[in-house]
Amino acid sequence: MLGASCPVEDCYTPLMRNKNGKMFCVRCDQYVVTEEEAKKQAEQEAEEMAAAAAAEEAEAEARYEEERRRRIEQQFRLEEQAKQAREMQELEQAKAQRATMAQAPVPKRKIDNAASLNGAESDAEINAIRRQTLAALYQKMEALTDSLSPNDHSERLISVAKAVKEIAEAAQLLK
């Protein structure tokens, strides 16, 4: 017996503790919760709800960041594809012009113009290769930064930082 009685009106039977430590009224056949236990339960529920809300908010933030990263990546790919399409179109036009010039009789003075067209075509090819190389460098840099985690050893962090720095320098040289 606990020295406390059942709070139900017209009962007032002394309370007993069961095996789990909860107070129990034998006459009413009900468990009784004290104010302290009710406060503890309310606090525990509030903490659980706050933790769940924080976890949900963190998950929503992570989804937002992932979606944002995907959009940026997709936009970058689309821009690269558009550049490559323009370059391919320029190459096709240059080839078509060269083919029409090769079929037409060419006076000696126009030989210099044909040589400059070949130079323009090679410049377009070089620009296409440069853009592809830059895209590959950016992808490698992104893969390296995505591979990092807070649990990584400091030596790994240093080596990844050096690699990212070297990739950035190479990208600057190609621009």
Image: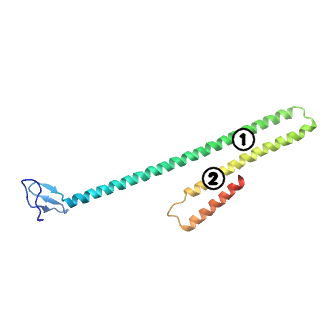
Residue shown at 69% from the left, 55% from the top: 172
Say left or right for 160 vs 5: right
Say left or right for 108 vs 13: right
Is residue 61 depicted above or below 87 in this figure?
A: below
Q: Are marks 2 and 1 in contact (CB under 8 Å)?
A: no
Q: Position of residue 6 (x, y in %)?
A: 11, 58
Q: Position of residue 7 (x, y in %)?
A: 12, 56
Sequence-wise, which precedes: disc 2 or disc 1? 1
Residue shown at 22% from the left, 60% from the top: 37
Q: Position of residue 119 (x, y in %)?
A: 82, 44
The tag on residue 87 is: 1
The tag on residue 138 is: 2
Q: Position of residue 153 (x, y in %)?
A: 53, 67
Residue shown at 58% from the left, 47% from the top: 73
Give the colour scheme of this rendering: rainbow
Residue shown at 43% from the left, 53% from the top: 58
- Number of other residues with Cα within 10 Å of mark 2, as a class: few under 14, some 14 to 19, many 20 or more: some
Amino acid at the residue labelled 2:
Tyr
Amino acid at the residue labelled 1:
Glu
In the rendered image, the quadrant that contains the N terminus is bottom left
Q: Quadrant of residue 12?
A: bottom left
Q: Quadrant of residue 4?
A: bottom left
Is residue 158 depicted above or below 136 in this figure?
A: below
Q: CA distance from mark 2 to mark 1?
A: 20 Å
Element under disc 2: helix
Which residue is farthest right? 108
